[in-house]
Amino acid sequence: MPPFSHNPVEGYILELDDGDGGQFREVYVGKETLCTIDGLHFNSTYNARVKAFNSSGVGPYSKTVVLQTSDVAWFTFDASSAHRDIVLSNDNQTATCSSYDDRVVLGTAAFSKGVHYWELHVDRYDNHPDPAFGVARINVVKDMMLGKDDKAWAMYVDNNRSWFMHCNSHTNRTEGGVSKGATVGVLLDLNKHTLTFFINGKQQGPSAFENVEGVFMPALSLNRNVQLSCHGANPPSNLSFQFDKVANYDACRIHE
């Protein structure tokens, strides 16, 4: 409570540090005692403190509370930002497309540090389309294949081979494609700043991209000839030591 005050509390001010022991910053001001804070990192520890205010002034800070964010990033496909031709189902875990042209959909999580791995399952694959998998900025172009602009880093793959693509530059053609039932894995390592792809648990080509920095969202593009679903995933067995070291990998939410 504010000092020397008999008036009721009118609101609260919540402050968090940066997760690395840095300065506190104001993240919420309002009347509610429950709030959601965006932009926090997974597998991180934050210090939090709160103070109340009313017409008499501002009260003292509470004791500092330590908050631990989730080890695992849960995400589904983001209906609010997807291209209008994208059709989502199964609690936004399954994506199809109503167009013969490639359209982009993003995941609901954003990553800026740590090591993250997720998998997409090919539920349907007709007429040899070439879906693309990877990461993108929030403002990626949604009406063409992922990786054709400078806001996405992707691997596109048909039934025989794959390519890496960024800024419409196609590199590292690799034999081995997808079919119905295949699983495509994406490993975003923001400690090493690399992006690596897997098909059915086996690494597809070399590390696709290096020096990747900033904020990334899971992303894919597809047309009407393919259906993709996100699934919970463990990292491939040959990466177990690396993941044990960082103790953090990600998966789409599984609804039981």
Image: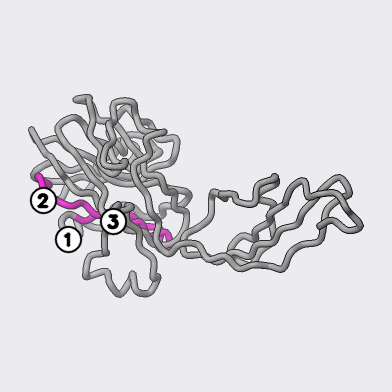
Taking the magenta stretch, the answer to whether it contains residue 203 is no
Dot 3 amino acid type:
Thr
On the image, the x and y values in percent for residue 42 come to: 47, 60
Q: Would you identify the image quadrant in which residue 179 lies?
A: top left
Dot 2 amino acid type:
Gly
- Which element is circle 1 on? strand
Side (left or right) of 11 relative to 91: right
- Which element is circle 3 on? strand
Residue matched to label 2: 176
The reply to whether discs 2 and 1 touch (Cβ–Cβ < 8 Å) is yes
The reply to whether discs 3 and 2 touch (Cβ–Cβ < 8 Å) is no
On the image, the x and y values in percent for residue 246 come to: 40, 70
Label 3, label 2: how many angstroms apart (C-alpha)? 15 Å
Label 2, label 1: how many angstroms apart (C-alpha)? 10 Å
Side (left or right) of 234 relative to 109: left
Q: Quadrant of the N terminus?
A: bottom right
- Label 1 environment density (alpha carbons within 10 Å; few <14, some 14–19, many ≥20): some
Looking at the image, is 157 positioned above or below residue 191? Answer: above
- Label 3 environment density (alpha carbons within 10 Å; few <14, some 14–19, many ≥20): many
Dot 1 amino acid type:
Lys
* Extent of the magenta region: 178-198
Viewer-nearest residue: 249 or 208: 249
Query: What residue is rendered at 44% in x and 35% in y?
Result: 139
Residue matched to label 1: 202
Residue matched to label 3: 196
